[in-house]
Image: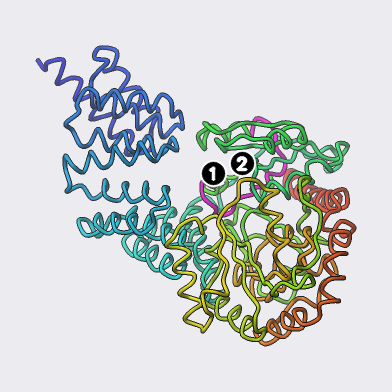
């Protein structure tokens, strides 16, 4: 007859198998069964910790992971598991110590080197992170998380080309892994040199994998098929907080017509702040879904009888596209938080406008494009924004171009173009501001890239994050003219610049991501700041830089111009979107009622 210890190990072996197959509940149940008899059992605590981490119940995960280490302090696996829990709990300093201790005990585990690299990445020690990840890949060249973590680290330090290259190495090893494809889709928006067709193909590939066997599956919903009733609209996002997406979501929620729409917000972010509370107050129903599994969230949405579910993340981190592939509502749409298609056929609509996605352009979308009549964005100006200040050049200072976009949006192509602008305007400077510039590696790389095009470091001012939004916006007092990134345009940055009186010159491209700037500028009547070639971009920037009175007049009137434009007209934007919702819903009801007759 097996001993109790042998029975416990059999239970834990089965629990580990459950976890490997994604069944966190069953894994946790097995671990807890052992823990009832042996509360300090290291393996049982370790399995419980990983299961609680999967369920996003992090205090419980920390408790069990720390108990596992206390019970078996010479076991590198226990320290590595504790490191993973600390990493999930946003405690990278503790995570660092755990992984370093694990590697002292056993330096041959590739995954631990890779996890250490991820921790170093979060601590903004990027070169150390890549070195640690590379040590893991030397041990195990087929470690998928190693290639993916290497890719994301390179993207963080604005090496987008290298990021895509590393992610493709992961895909080579597991070409049907949807996670690897979604990471690659996101990264492919940043570098220059990739064709629109190539980027679209990656998104379609993701959709084909994740929707295999689902696209033609019949689904039914209990929603009342009345085309005229009040609609329940669900908004799904992890960014219902102080985040760029929230600045565009909030005015929509505040402007919805309650006689037409009930708005349900499904938030799956662990970060809660004053913006979260504003969104909570603005919507009809707010659901905190932070700890919900995909299945639990899907059931919640179905129970709420959501008519139209609008997802706001696309292929951004921690999205829910794999859940939406199973259809959570009669109509699903994608909007706002991502500049490309989801690749899913089970998301029927993508919300754009005729400037980002012209009728005569290739759609590059698996969804049906719904073009709003005025603009696809509505901006909520920050209430703490400083007043507009005069142009620095008018006050006798050197003319200063600026870009406050993320460093990873600064492609090789745009560095070359901006360098040409600087050469065309002698004595001018360029002010770059981004959170990642607090890292010396990112700053050094950026300087080298401009120097390669003949721009001395003295003409660059590189600034990192500032403590508050008001201080961030005040930096626009030092900028005469903003330059948009390419091929991935700015969105919030362009709106902030304009609100602070700083116009933006934008290069229009051949896809949505490189037409957003054009849409924003056209919406406020600044069509003449849109360039369709490198030469035109240089000409527009040079012309503005040498016409101080015109630029000053533009600057001092830009906030009022923007405030009176459709870009800041919440009620009109809400009506336009509600009309779209009603048209979709009426079509669905007619089709459903026709099928039943």
Q: Which mark is residue 328?
A: 2
Q: Quadrant of the N terminus?
A: top left
Location of residue 448 (image quadrant):
bottom left
In the picture as drawn, the residue positioned furthest to the top comes out as 37
Q: Which residue is mark 1?
A: 323
Left or right: where does residue 227 sit relative to residue 470?
right
Please determine whether, in this image, residue 134 is positioned above or below residue 257: below
Left or right: where does residue 332 sit relative to residue 154?
right
In the picture as drawn, the residue positioned furthest to the left comes out as 1
Left or right: where does residue 594 sit relative to residue 31?
right
Q: Mark 2 falls on what kind of element?
A: loop
Scheme of image coloration: rainbow
Q: Which residues are magenta?
A: 302-318
Kindly tell me whether residue 441 is visible in this rendering. yes
Residue at 84% from the left image edge and 59% from the top image edge: 559
Q: Residues within 10 Å of mark 2 (few under 14, many from 20)?
A: many
**Magenta run includes residue 316:** yes
Real-space Cα separation, disc 2 to disc 1, in angstroms? 8 Å
CB atoms at circles 2 and 1 under 8 Å apart?
A: yes
Location of residue 195 (image quadrant):
bottom right
Q: Nearer the viewer, residue 335 or 152?
A: 152
Q: Mark 1 falls on what kind of element?
A: helix
**Residue 115: x percent and y percent?**
32, 47
Please determine whether, in this image, residue 556 is positioned above or below residue 31: below
Q: Quadrant of the C terminus?
A: top right
Residue at 27% from the left image edge and 38% from the top image edge: 80
**Magenta run includes residue 541:** no
Please determine whether, in this image, residue 261 is positioned above or below residue 570: above
Q: Main secondary structure of the magenta part?
A: loop
In the picture as drawn, the residue positioned furthest to the front comes out as 396
**Residue 416: x percent and y percent?**
55, 80
Left or right: where does residue 104 sit relative to residue 389?
left
């Amino acid at each position: 007859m097996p001993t109790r210890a042998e029975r416990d190990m059999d239970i834990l072996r089965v629990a580990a198998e459950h976890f490997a197959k994604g069944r966190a509940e069953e894994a946790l149940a097995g671990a807890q069964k052992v823990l009832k008899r042996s509360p300090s059992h290291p393996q049982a605590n370790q399995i419980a910790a990983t299961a609680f981490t999967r369920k996003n119940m992090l205090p419980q995960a920390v408790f069990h992971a720390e108990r596992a280490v206390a019970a078996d302090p010479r076991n590198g696996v226990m320290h590595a598991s504790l490191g993973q829990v600390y990493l999930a709990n946003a405690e990278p300093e503790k995570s660092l110590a755990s992984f370093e201790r694990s590697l002292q005990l056993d330096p041959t585990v590739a995954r631990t080197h890779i996890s250490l690299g991820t921790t170093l990445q979060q601590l903004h020690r990027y070169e150390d992170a890549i070195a640690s990840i590379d040590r893991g890949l030397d041990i195990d060249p087929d470690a998928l998380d190693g290639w993916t973590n290497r890719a994301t680290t390179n993207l963080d330090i604005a090496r987008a080309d290298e990021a895509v290259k590393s992610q493709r190495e992961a895909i080579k090893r597991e070409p049907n892994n949807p996670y690897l494809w979604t990471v690659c889709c996101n990264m492919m928006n940043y570098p220059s040199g990739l064709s629109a067709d190539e980027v679209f193909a990656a998104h379609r590939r993701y959709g084909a994998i994740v929707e295999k066997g689902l696209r033609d599956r019949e689904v039914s919903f209990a929603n009342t098929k009345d085309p005229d009733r009040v609609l329940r609209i669900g908004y799904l996002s992890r960014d219902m907080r102080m985040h760029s997406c929230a600045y565009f979501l909030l005015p929509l929620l505040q402007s919805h017509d309650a006689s037409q729409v009930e708005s349900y917000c499904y938030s799956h972010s662990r970060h809660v702040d004053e913006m979260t509370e504003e969104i909570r107050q603005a919507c009809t129903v707010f659901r905190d879904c932070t700890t919900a599994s995909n299945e639990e969230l899907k059931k919640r949405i179905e129970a709420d009888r959501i008519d139209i579910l609008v997802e706001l993340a696309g292929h951004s981190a921690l999205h829910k596209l794999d859940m939406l592939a199973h259809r959570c509502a009669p109509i699903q749409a994608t909007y706002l938080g991502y500049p490309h298609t989801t690749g899913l056929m089970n998301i029927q609509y993508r919300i754009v406008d005729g400037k980002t996605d012209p009728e005569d352009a290739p759609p590059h979308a698996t969804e049906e494009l719904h073009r709003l009549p005025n603009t696809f964005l509505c901006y909520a100006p920050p209430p703490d924004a400083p007043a507009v200040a005069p142009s620095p050049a008018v006050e006798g200072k050197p003319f200063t171009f600026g870009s406050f976009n993320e460093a990873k949006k600064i492609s090789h192509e745009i560095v070359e173009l901006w360098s040409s602008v600087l050469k065309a305007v002698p004595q001018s400077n360029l002010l770059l501001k981004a959170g990642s510039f607090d890292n010396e590696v990112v700053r050094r790389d950026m300087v080298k890239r401009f120097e390669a095009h003949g721009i001395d470091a003295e003409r660059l001012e590189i600034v990192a994050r500032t403590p508050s939004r008001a201080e961030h916006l005040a930096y626009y007092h030092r900028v005469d003219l903003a330059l948009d990134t390419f091929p991935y345009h700015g969105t919030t940055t362009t709106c902030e610049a304009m609100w602070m009186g700083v116009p933006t010159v934008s290069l229009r491209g051949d896809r949505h991501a490189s037409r957003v700037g054009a849409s924003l500028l056209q919406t406020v009547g600044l069509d003449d700041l849109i360039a369709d070639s490198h030469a035109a971009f240089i000409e527009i920037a040079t012309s503005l830089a040498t016409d101080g009175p015109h630029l000053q007049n533009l600057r001092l009137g830009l906030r009022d111009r923007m405030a009176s434009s459709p870009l800041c007209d919440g009620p009109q934007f809400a009506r336009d979107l509600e009309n779209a919702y009603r048209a979709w819903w009426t079509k669905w009801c007619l089709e459903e009622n026709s099928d039943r007759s």
